[in-house]
Image (cartoon, coloured by chain):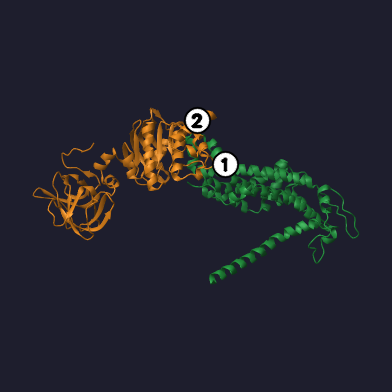
Chain colours: A green, B orange
Amino acid sequence: MRRDTRRKVFLSVRHALLSLWLLISILPIYWMVTTAFKLPEQWYTWPPTWFPSPPTLENFYVTWMGYQMIPRPGVVLPTINLDPLLALGNSVVIAGSATLLSVAIGLLLAYGVSRYQIIPEKRMFNLLILRMMPPIVIAIPLVIWYSTLRFLDTWHGMIIIYTITTIPYAAWMTKSFIDEVPEEMEQAAQLLGASKLRAFFTIVVPLIRSGIVATCMFILILTWSEYLLALVMTAADAQTMPVQLSKFEGASEGRLYGLQSAMSIGVTIPLIVIGILIHKHLVRGFSFGMIRRQ
Amino acid sequence: MGSIRLENLRKEFGGGVVAVANTNLTIEEGEFVVLVGPSGCGKTTTLRMIAGLEEPTRGDIYIGAVRVNDLEPGARDIGLVFQNLALFPHMSVFDNIGFGPKMKKVDPEERRRLVEDVARMVRIHPLLSKLPGQLSGGEAQRVALARTLITQPQVFLLDEPLSNLDAKLRKEMRAEVDRLHKELETTFVYVTHDQEEAMTLADRIVVMRDGHIDQVGTPLEIYHDPVNLFVADFFGSPPMNLLEGETHRENGAPSFRAGEFIVHLSGSVPEVEGPVTLGIRPEHMAVGDAGSAGDKDFSAKIVLVEPLGKDILLYLDYGSEKNLIAVVEGHRNFQTGAAVSVHLQQDRLYYFGADERRLRPAGAVRTAS
């Protein structure tokens, strides 16, 4: 009985802590979603308005479809310049291309290290050290370079810099998956007449498919939400969603929480949808050990 | 076509480790050769060099009349069964077996026929739609064999293929491998560290140690006429009894002494004075009751009786730290602690010098070879 009681106490404490953590994690999201449906009068109220009454779609109309806000006494109409659809398109193209490129190059690099030691395994760590440098350090020199190359505020400029900065992660993640594929499997394929390239694509790639998908998701989240480099290296044409999101503050109108929230939802939803679509791969990819040793 | 010739084959790994040292070996077409030795003796490296998965540091490899050093593994017309089988876990058994023909662009209809034929041959026909993860150890083994068989290589290489199976299954698969060799009549090179597997399967055994070949011969030659202490000790279960001591001659009568322990030797004894190791196989010792009549070389005490059914193993204390093991018929009755008399078959004694080499009596002809 005593053991049983102890177990119950332990379980309830654990549940209490987890519930608290859940609350802490979910509160900002709850706040974002509800604020998106609030009228301007409720954005700043104290005590806070926990539930929008009446809920309105006005914020979505204004941010996403370019409508003017309904004039109200005491509320200054915002004069900010938004182009969320362009920014969304930019984000999709830049983050998407950079992710695919980064994972493709990272995968080849990881394969070379794992099978042919093109970089000694010990030196693989140096790749990560690259990432320990604060991005702000490279931001300014990069702007100078990019302006010479006329890469500023372009898709290819952003794709290149995002690809380069995420390759270390892609290589590290995919290498751990490749290491799990016994070399004998490729050798068996080669002995049966497959070329090295063919063995890579028919044996290694299908076996680590879940790992590759998980890596893509990870890199996509990184590039999708990157702010600093996007801020200094884009202006109008190639501006991405995170930069747009920072525009909701004006001198006269203050912070426009409702509009910002409405846009935030649009930024978040694509990632959530992709996450749900590939969730089977994510579970397998992140839990490793997917290849059963015989 | 399927003969293999290794000439001065050498493999060094980084750090000056010599895995295989200047090996010469000729394997005839259709022969079943087993490379055997303790782990790290270079047998797997030799096999992998034949397969083309390791590049020799020096030396030449010929398959048939062709020097294959510069050929890719896939171009050498060999098949290799890996120790861990290396089945492709994401492909069905059918696709695993059909992988070779697919790479050779055999059309799907023909491929299906080939796969079904070879699957029938190794009796896995009902399993074709399963994934490797759903197979038992023995079934996976058969799939690995089938995947290699289907390409009809002129040389079969098998790298400890049975080491992951339990004892009963291992025996069953051993017979299966033997049957396949007899059916196919191609060259088999089989690597194992299990002397029993080597004895039962091989036409010829190649005993390797530390990158060198110690002895090449038929199983019976290896068993009855080992060239050195290592080979003698490696083959046989229970192993050969080895007694360290010295030979002496008094008035021309040779004897073997190890401390207090003395055995008078008769028959042909090598002309050596000084330290020797005396070897006798457990089945070449006769054990009788202490008081019984008959030949007796020395007395001993039974420390342990291990009945195996057909035979009994007796562990005998003869006054040294190590016990002797003798095999006697299973119906006899022995008690632990009893004193017994032991007789050695003098013509079955082996003598090894301090350098572990076999010492032969002057003028003796090698018996079996």
**Residue displayed at 51% across by 30% down:** B111
Circle 1 SS class: helix
Q: Which residue is mark 1?
A: A206
Horizontally, residue A85 falls left or right of residue B364, namely right
Q: Amino acid at mark 2?
A: Arg
Q: Nearer the viewer, residue B288 or B16?
A: B288
Q: Please state, as top left, top right, bottom left or bottom right, where the N terminus of chain A lies in the image.
A: bottom right
Q: How crowded is the residue under tag 2: few (<14 C-alpha within 10 Å), some, or many (20+)?
A: few
Horizontally, residue A190 falls left or right of residue A12, namely left
**Residue displayed at 83% across by 55% down:** A56
Label ID, residue A177: none
Q: Is residue B288 above or below residue A154?
A: below
Q: Is residue B198 above or below residue A20?
A: above
Q: How crowded is the residue under tag 1: few (<14 C-alpha within 10 Å), some, or many (20+)?
A: some
Tags 2 and 1 on a common chain: no
Q: Nearer the viewer, residue B101 or A223?
A: B101
Q: Nearer the viewer, residue A232 or B194?
A: B194
- The percent coordinates of residue A157 (x first, y second) are 70, 43
- Residue B138 seen in render: yes
Q: Amino acid at mark 1?
A: Pro
What distance separates the C-alpha of mark 2 from that of mark 1? 26 Å
Q: Residue furthest right?
A: A73
| Pair 2/1: label in front | 2
Label ID, residue B113: 2
- The percent coordinates of residue B222 (x first, y second) are 27, 41
Quarter of the image for residue B365 reads top left
